[in-house]
Each structure stands twice: as structure tokens, then as C-alpha cells.
Amino acid sequence: MAGAYAETGRSWSGPAAATARRRGGDLVVALEEVAGELEKGAEALRDHAVRLADLTDRGRRLEEEAAAHGLLLGANGPAPAPGIRGEADAVAAARLEAARATLGERWAGLLAESSAAAADLGIALDEARRGLAGAATALRSR
């Protein structure tokens, strides 16, 4: 952008032209700073979107696995799905309890990862906001 702007000044001369070119050059630099901040923020948001999509996909797969065992995942972990249920034998009950415990551990881990991802996203958004605010202030001052 700066190179293209410099090319436009070759045919215009004089003190007014020099002042306008200098101010225009300052604006080009400021706009490039804003563009850089926007690109940095967009890259961070893309990275977080990929992370959150992965967590969402893992959560869905875990819910499907829980449903296959007759369980629902909630804030308190896996619980039996509503409906009539009986214990046909002790082995089946033990398998269900083992599945509930394993799914509960994995669910708790996923919730912890999701909380960390949300906190990281908040930090990234705050950093992007500060970077853009700084670039906007620099742009206004030129």
C-alpha cells in the first residue's frame, strides 16, 4: 500500500504536495497498523474457533456414547436416562456403573477444557480489543 501511495506523488510537486504526501504517508502507515491488528485478531479467532469446534465435536461424541449406555450427560455428570429400567443381572449393572464412572471422568475433563478454552478466548478478545483500540487511537492522531 505504501509503495502504491509513493508512486502517486511523482507527478505532483510543491510545498502543499509535500505536506499532503507526508500526511498521506502517515495515514497509510496507520492503516497498515490497523490492518495488522485486524489480521492478528482474525487469526486468533480462527484458532479459538477450531479449538471450540473440536470441543463441541468431542462433547457430541461423548453424549452419543452415554446414550448408547442409557445415560444422559448433564452438569452433574452422567445420569440414567428417563424411562423404566430394571437390573437384569449384577454383571449388567456393574457394566453400567463402570460406563457411568468412565464417562463421568471424561465429561469432567471436557468441561474443564471447555472452561479453559472460554477463558483463553476472553483473553484473546481482550488483547484484540486493546490492539485495535491502540491502532485506532494512532490513526485518529495522524
Image: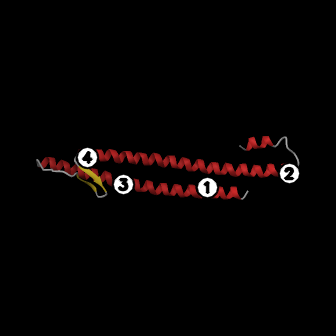
Q: Amino acid at mark 1?
A: Leu
Disc 1: which residue:
132
Q: CA distance from mark 4 to mark 2?
A: 75 Å
Rounded to the nearest angstrom, the CA distance separating label 2 from label 1 is 31 Å
Quote the CA–CA distance across marks 4 and 1: 45 Å
Q: Earlier in the sequence, mark 4 or mark 1?
A: 4
Q: Position of residue 69 (x, y in %)?
A: 22, 46
Tag of residue 111: 3
Q: Quadrant of the N terminus?
A: top right
Identify the image quadrant of residue 11. top right
**Residue where numbered disc 2 is placed:** 16
Secondary structure found at label 3: helix
Query: How is colour applied across the structure in the image?
Result: secondary structure
Which of pointers 3 and 1 lies earlier in the amino acid sequence?
3
In the image, is residue 8 above or below residue 111?
Answer: above
The spot of residue 52 in percent (x, y) is: 43, 49
Query: Which residue bears the numbered disc 4?
Result: 67
Mark 2: amino acid:
Ala
Quarter of the image with the C terminus is bottom right
